[in-house]
């Protein structure tokens, strides 16, 4: 503190920085609060500078270990932002010797009274309520000492390492179970859709075969009628036998021309051909009659 020597150190010049106040005493008794700027103290009248008090916002991080309702030990980290009030600077300067220790004691008291009422999951969900309870208690207690609580935050909740690993495993198992259920549901939907597709395909295939057979019967009927009209003296049976034999030999030709065909043994005598024609004709006529 620079002092100006005048008339035997009778005056002392005091500089007070911004966001700071100075506390003065006269013969050991509180006298005044000096605002930022330059001030002269008449030391010959017993005035002296007792000290400075910062009005800036300060932060204190408090780590508190406690136990939850379900017997899980956790470390709760609270961040307290506070500052001294200019109009109560004398209380903030004289009434507390250890401001941080006082705040820490109140934080311990509130956290250890609130967390044991909650399960570990509820502690994470209700951390804002815990912070609000700490702030309300600090505000009531510290205002009497000239301090304002600006903000209180629960910045971290750290369970025991084994508990944390167990919680992660429970969460992973639940997610795997959910994924398995979703996968099974997806496979079920795929099987249902595949079965529906196969049923629709078979239905459409049956319609196609029925229409194909209907077209063959209609074509044969038209051929028989046309041939009977154009060739006098032929009966419908003669025309049918000729058409069936023609189709029979066309089929044999296609089988022989196919590169993937294997050996097929069929009766090839004239009597056998007549028997084949009779069987084909009877089958087609029976199908036409049932239709």
Image (cartoon, rainbow, N blue to C red):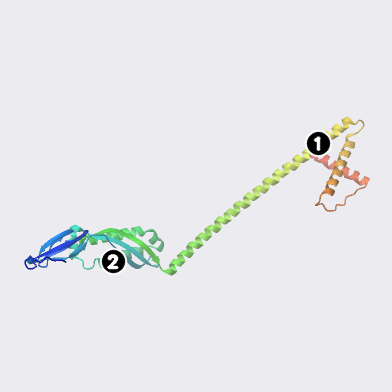
Q: Residue at x 20, y 63 (%)?
A: 53
Of helix, strand and loop, which one carries label 1? helix
Disc marking residue 104: 2
Above or below, 4 relative to 231? below
Q: Position of residue 114 (x, y in %)?
A: 33, 63
In this rendered view, identify the residue nearer to me: 59 or 142. 59
Inter-mark Cα distance, 1 to 2: 103 Å
Q: How far across and down, in percent of the image, does residue 156 sit?
A: 37, 63
The quarter in which the C terminus is drawn is: top right
Can you tell which quarter of the image residue 155 is in? bottom left
Image mark for residue 93: none
Q: Residue at x 85, y 32 (%)?
A: 226
Instruction: Find out whether the residues at labels 1 and 2 contact each other: C-beta distance under 8 Å.
Output: no
Q: Is residue 34 visible?
A: no
Q: Position of residue 236 (x, y in %)?
A: 88, 35
Q: Which residue is mark 1?
A: 219
Q: Secondary structure at mark 2?
A: helix
Q: Decide if residue 184 is on the left or right side of residue 103.
A: right
The local crowd at label 1, few if under 14, some if 14 to 19, many if 20 or more residues have their Cα within 10 Å, is few
On screen, residue 128 versus residue 270, left or right, reads: left
Res 92 → quadrant: bottom left
Q: Is residue 71 left or right of residue 283?
A: left
* Image side of residue 250 versus residue 163, left or right: right
Residue 230's spot in the image, x, y percent? 88, 30
Which residue occupies 67% across, 45% down? 200
Say whether disc 1 or disc 2 marks the residue closer to the N-terminus.
2
Up the image or down, 244 lies above or below 182; here it is above
């Amino acid at each position: 503190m620079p002092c100006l020597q005048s008339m035997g150190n009778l005056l002392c010049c005091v500089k007070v920085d911004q966001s700071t106040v100075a506390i003065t005493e006269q013969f050991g008794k509180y006298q005044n609060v000096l605002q930022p700027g330059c001030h002269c103290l008449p030391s010959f009248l017993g005035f002296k500078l007792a000290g400075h008090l910062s009005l800036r916002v300060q932060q204190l991080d408090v780590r508190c270990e406690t136990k939850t309702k379900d017997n899980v030990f956790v470390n709760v980290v609270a961040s307290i932002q506070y500052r001294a009030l200019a109009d109560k600077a004398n209380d903030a300067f004289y009434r507390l010797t250890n401001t941080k220790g006082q705040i820490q004691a109140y934080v311990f008291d509130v956290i250890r009274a609130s967390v044991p009422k909650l399960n570990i999951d509820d502690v994470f969900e209700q951390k804002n309520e815990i912070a609000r309870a700490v702030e309300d208690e600090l505000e009531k207690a510290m205002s009497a000492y000239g301090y304002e609580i600006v903000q209180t935050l629960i910045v971290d909740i750290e369970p025991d390492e084994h508990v944390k690993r167990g919680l992660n495993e429970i969460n992973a198992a639940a997610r795997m179970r959910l994924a398995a259920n979703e996968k099974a549901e997806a496979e079920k939907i795929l099987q249902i859709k595949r079965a529906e597709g196969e049923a629709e395909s078979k239905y459409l295939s049956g319609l196609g075969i029925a229409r194909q057979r209907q077209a063959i019967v209609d074509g044969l009927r038209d051929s028989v009628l046309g041939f009977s009209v154009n060739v006098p003296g032929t009966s419908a049976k003669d025309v049918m036998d000729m058409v069936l034999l023609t189709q029979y030999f066309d089929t044999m030709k296609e089988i022989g021309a196919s590169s993937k065909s294997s050996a097929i043994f069929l009766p090839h005598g004239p009597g056998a051909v007549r028997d084949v024609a009779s069987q084909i004709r009877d089958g087609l006529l029976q199908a036409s009659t049932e239709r």
